[in-house]
Amino acid sequence: PPPPPPPPRVIFYMQTRPFAMLRRLVGSEMCIRDRAYADAIQHHSCTGIVDVGCRWGRVNDVLIDAGLQYDYLGFDTSAEPIKYGQEIFDDKSYIKLLQASWQDPPKADFDVDCVILGAVLIYDESIYERLLNFYKAHTVIIQEPIQSQIHWHPELKLQRVDLEKYAPFDTDVIVEAEVFAGNRRIVSLKYPS
């Protein structure tokens, strides 16, 4: 008999370099998340975006493809994905990526009307009000793990975020995201100006 086929290639989502494997995985969970971000940005007509915990700023691929005119400041504490994003968006003067922390957030050189909080409230929920006030933004997009996900480790020093206290939402999407070891909920809301 012929030899058995080789086992399928398994890619684990680690903090090393998954962002550099393929820039776009059409239909992938990451792209679905980015599409939900972009849909909320378009729903609220946002043109000045700050993305907290942005990794390499992959939402920009979707926003560029949609033909949107906007300014973007993304920051993350991890140097490697920021460097990667700076390289691929080098020709886009309206996209700025920085290594920084929400404890000392960078200033935007444009009017901010939207803050994306991508899975950061699980670390410190107090940053919600602080960053919205710092950037004077009226729209927020929040992405957090759903607590019933399959790989929630109780020994991790993460908060369980009750998104319902931020309701009512203008947009509300659940992304089934095995790459995140579970599901994510992405909501957006706009406060009166």
Image: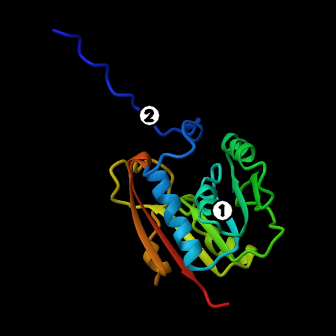
Among the 4 quarters of the image, the one containing residue 176: bottom left
Q: Nearer the viewer, residue 64 or 39?
A: 64
Badge 2 local density, few (<14 within 10 Å), some, or many (20+)? few
Query: What is the x, y in percent for residue 110?
Result: 81, 72
Q: Residue at x 48, y 40 (%)?
A: 13
Q: Residue at x 59, y 36 (%)?
A: 17
When the figure is inspected, residue 6 is found, relative to residue 1, above or below; the finding is: below
Specify the quadrant that holds the C terminus. bottom right
Specify the quadrant that holds the N terminus. top left
Number of marks present in the image shown: 2
Amino acid type for the residue under numbered disc 1: Asp
Query: What is the x, y in percent for residue 92?
Result: 77, 55
Specify the farthest residue to the right: 109
Left or right position of 26 against 116: left
Which comes sooner in the sequence, label 1 or label 2? Answer: 2
- Mark 2 residue element: loop
- Residue placed under numbered mark 2 in the picture: 11
Amino acid type for the residue under numbered disc 2: Ile
- Regarding residue 53, the answer to whether it shows in the image is no
Q: Nearer the viewer, residue 125 or 40?
A: 40
Among the 4 quarters of the image, the one containing residue 68: bottom right
Query: What is the x, y in percent for residue 157?
Result: 51, 52
- Residue placed under numbered mark 1 in the picture: 51
Left or right position of 18 against 5: right
Label 1 – label 2 distance at C-alpha: 26 Å
Badge 1 local density, few (<14 within 10 Å), some, or many (20+)? many
Left or right position of 38 against 164: right
Q: Residue at x 53, y 46 (%)?
A: 24
Specify the farthest residue to the top: 1
Among the 4 quarters of the image, the one containing residue 191: bottom right
